[in-house]
Image (cartoon, rainbow, N blue to C red):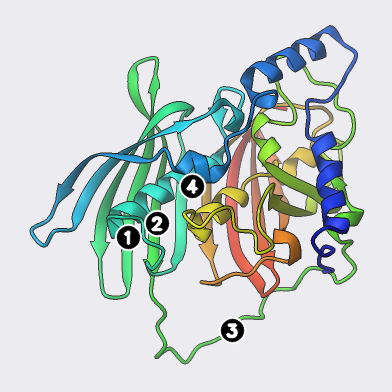
């Protein structure tokens, strides 16, 4: 697909368009006015907290050490600010990123960027998370090539401290002795896809919400740019859902980085979940959704974004019935396929 324009050119124009359409949609109903008031209260009208600053709130509370001086279990605390929320919880990508940050810090003790590449992650979204949270991480195994770490986000619920998200992360060093190499088995995106400068925000348009409890677009989307390159729009009662979407962090550098202290795999994991599920194209109106599980494999240990820090997500709805949907997702960069994932989502439409 065509890459975005050079810095200062069309790519900036796309950002400006998205800024205008990522605010709460201006509707005429009284419920919509209440939504706008609620949106202001939960973060749209405050100074947003960048991902790098949010991760800087990470602090170790306690660690359990092995005899060789490395930790086997650690607990951290962090603060999820209101601008990262979607309703009563943060979105799954940030919860996953917090789990990964805890796993990285426990595995290396200091969260260094020289760990083996992240190869795979399995997330289970259990409950809501927001405000002050704790992250518990435990090393399951630390081998010569592969290391496995479990990490969970805990938040204060009605019955006390409760698990909100749990994850398992596998890090693996390259096995250079392997003779098997097949990197072009997947069909690349169409070369005719328009560049970001020619695309509208995926949230552009007018949506009649079912009531003031659904905030759309979600508050956290003020941190990102999501531009629909191909496929049906959201809540258009489409017969199928197969979308290509350009995504990037607002304020990212030309390579997609969001700060030298933020590991690329942490920022990419959070970014890979910023768009609504593909089944949203099948909805006839705005309705809540909730991710249940997410499995993602990172195929390129050093992925490179398209120009301007953009990545291309393809998301396909495979099945939706009885309030649940299944989807397949691909994340593409300038060097080819960067990650593939599957996600199960609860839908309330």
Pointers 2 and 1 in contact (C-beta within 8 Å): yes
Can you tell which of label 1 and label 3 is closer to the viewer? 1
Q: Which residue is mark 3?
A: 182
Which residue is disc 1 drawn over?
Answer: 148
Q: Earlier in the sequence, mark 1 or mark 3?
A: 1
Instruction: Give the total of numbered labels.
Output: 4
The answer to whether residue 231 is seen in the rendering is: no
Tell which circle, 1 or 4, labels the residue nearer the N-terminal end.
Answer: 4
- Cα separation between marks 4 and 2: 11 Å
- Residue beneath the point at 66% across and 58% down: 253
User: Residue beneath label 2, please?
Assistant: 169
Residue 177 place in picture, x, y as percent: 39, 91
The percent coordinates of residue 337 (x first, y second) are 65, 70
State left or right for residue 247 relative to residue 199: left
Using the numbered discs, state the Cα–Cα distance from disc 2 to disc 1 in whole angstroms. Answer: 6 Å
Q: Please, is residue 279 above or below residue 268 in the view?
A: above
Label 1 and label 3: CA atoms lie apart by: 25 Å
Q: Earlier in the sequence, mark 4 or mark 3?
A: 4
SS state under label 4: helix
């Amino acid at each position: 697909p065509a890459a975005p324009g050079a810095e200062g050119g069309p790519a900036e124009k796309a950002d400006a368009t998205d800024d205008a359409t990522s605010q709460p949609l201006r509707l005429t109903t009284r419920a919509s006015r209440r939504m706008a008031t609620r949106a202001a209260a939960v973060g749209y009208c405050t100074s947003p907290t960048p991902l790098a600053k949010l991760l800087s709130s990470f602090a170790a509370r306690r660690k359990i050490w092995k005899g060789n001086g490395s930790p086997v279990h650690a607990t951290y605390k962090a603060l999820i600010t209101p601008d990262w929320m979607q309703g009563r919880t943060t979105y799954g990508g940030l919860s996953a990123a917090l789990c990964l940050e805890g796993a990285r810090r426990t595995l290396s003790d200091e969260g260094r960027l020289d760990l083996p590449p992240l190869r795979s992650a399995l997330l289970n979204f259990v409950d809501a998370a927001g405000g002050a949270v704790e992250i518990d991480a435990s090393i399951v195994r630390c081998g010569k090539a592969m290391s496995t770490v479990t990490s969970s986000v805990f938040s204060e619920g009605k019955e006390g401290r409760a698990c909100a998200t749990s994850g398992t992360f596998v890090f693996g060093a390259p096995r250079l002795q392997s003779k098997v190499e097949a990197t072009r088995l997947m069909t690349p995106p169409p070369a005719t896809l328009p560049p970001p400068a020619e695309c509208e925000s995926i949230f552009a348009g007018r949506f009649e919400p079912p009531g003031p409890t659904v905030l759309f677009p979600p508050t956290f989307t003020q941190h990102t740019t999501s531009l629909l390159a191909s496929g049906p729009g959201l809540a258009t009662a489409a017969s199928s859902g197969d979308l290509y979407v350009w995504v990037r962090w607002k304020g990212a550098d030309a390579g997609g980085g969001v700060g030298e202290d933020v590991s690329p795999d942490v920022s990419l994991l959070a970014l890979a979940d910023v768009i609504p599920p593909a089944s949203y194209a099948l909805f006839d109106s705005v309705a809540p959704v909730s991710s249940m599980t997410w499995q993602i494999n990172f195929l390129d240990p050093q992925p490179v974004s398209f120009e301007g820090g953009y990545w291309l997500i393809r998301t396909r709805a495979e099945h939706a019935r009885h309030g649940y949907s299944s989807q397949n997702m691909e994340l593409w960069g300038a060097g080819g396929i960067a990650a593939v994932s599957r996600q199960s989502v609860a839908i309330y439409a």
